[in-house]
Image (cartoon, rainbow, N blue to C red):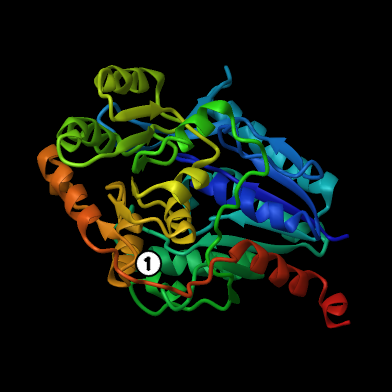
Amino acid sequence: MKKILFYCQNLLGVGHLVRTTELIRALAKDFQVCLIDGGQKIAGFELPPSVAVVQLPILQVVVSESNQVSKQLQVVGSTMTLAEAKECRKQLLIQTYDQFQPDCLITEGYPFSKKMALAFEMEPLLAHVKQSGYPTQIICSLRDIIMVKEFTDRTWEEQRRCAFTDQYYDAILLHSDPLVHRFEHNLTQQVDLNCPIHYTGYVVQSEPDVELPVADRTLLNHPAPTIVVSVGGGRLGHDLLESMIQAAPLLAEKIPHRIIMFAGPLMEEAQYDRFMQYSQGLSNLTLRRFTPNLMAFLQQADLSISLGGYNTTMNLLKTGVRAMIYPSNKDREQAIRAEKLERLNLLKVLDPEDLEPTHLAQAIVNYLTQAPTSHPHSLLLNGAQKASTILQTLLQPDLVAA
């Protein structure tokens, strides 16, 4: 059985981990898989028991009290200094590679995502793989939309990253439907990239094969129309949650409903406590920190209101729930995706001015009272399975041909 070493680092939210978890579930059926995880552990993202996990010292980016994302890294859950954690991670990556000797190394996002933040460990690892003499194929697992926003000369940086990819990588798995978003749509102009690109379609979460906890079953069995509000990991989107809390009493006067709000597993405890205080006494709103069973809530919901991260958006498309998306303002990635899907009548985009509580309440009422737009779509939503098939072809061409 061929061996895959899968590197994943979530520095801010949970999106990279969600997508990686789904890919590994599919890969574990046909490959021996080892996951190298550099981010915070999140309950509910269970891997098959056959998958080995190597946990690196945890790093994340700093988010200020004003919800601004910093480029600065910090160590989480350890007394190591940042320099010590970086050195430990670099050595552990190379040690894991030498011990596992994979046929394939998959890097989630890198080098198109987090190129500068993770170069301290990824460049030594990739150089080591190339010098090892072991025939390891290096694959980039990449979401649909990538952003290069921190450089004045963006074109130069795009060319540099493409040249780096050509130097080290054998292929790119692009988790997108090419009819919606292609790799070249990410670039400011035509750049040279010789590395083959394989479109997998979108990677969509599967429902956990576990019994729902009592708290989830109670909420799901409630007969009232439901609005589900979520902000992914919870380190961003605080303005959306606050606006929904303020809009809740206004909505109570207009339509029969209940609001189930998920604050996110990575939200700071102090911020979560503040939201709990704000929501006290609102009979139409239930605030929860997190559920691994979000798909079950979306399947039953009359409306979803959320940020526009990759995984949340794919969940919306899979369940077909009516959806309003407020793209995070940290970059244009969420807005680009949401605007493209809005043009296909698959969801509605909320602008910053829509978050004024009175406007938000009225927008929700208007959207729910409109006749739903019939929008059957044939988007490719089997990205995890397709990725496994592509890797079987790349790593076992003789077996696939037979």
Q: Residue at x 35, y 17 (%)?
A: 273
Which image quarter is the N terminus in? bottom right
Looking at the picture, does residue 243 appear above or below residue 315?
above
Residue corresponding to mark 1: 156
Res. 80 visible in picture? yes
Q: Residue at x 49, y 42 (%)?
A: 294
Looking at the picture, does residue 268 appear above or below residue 118?
above
- The residue sitting at the bottom extreme is 401
The residue tagged with tag 1: helix, strand or loop? helix
Coordinates of residue 235 in the picture (x, y in percent): 38, 34
Which image quarter is the C terminus in? bottom right
Coordinates of residue 149 in the picture (x, y in percent): 33, 56
Looking at the picture, does residue 149 appear above or below residue 267?
below
Quadrant in the rendering for residue 214:
top right
- The residue sitting at the front extreme is 223
Looking at the image, residue 247 sits to the left or right of residue 90; the answer is left
Q: Residue at x 45, y 32 (%)?
A: 219
Coordinates of residue 100 in the picture (x, y in percent): 83, 48
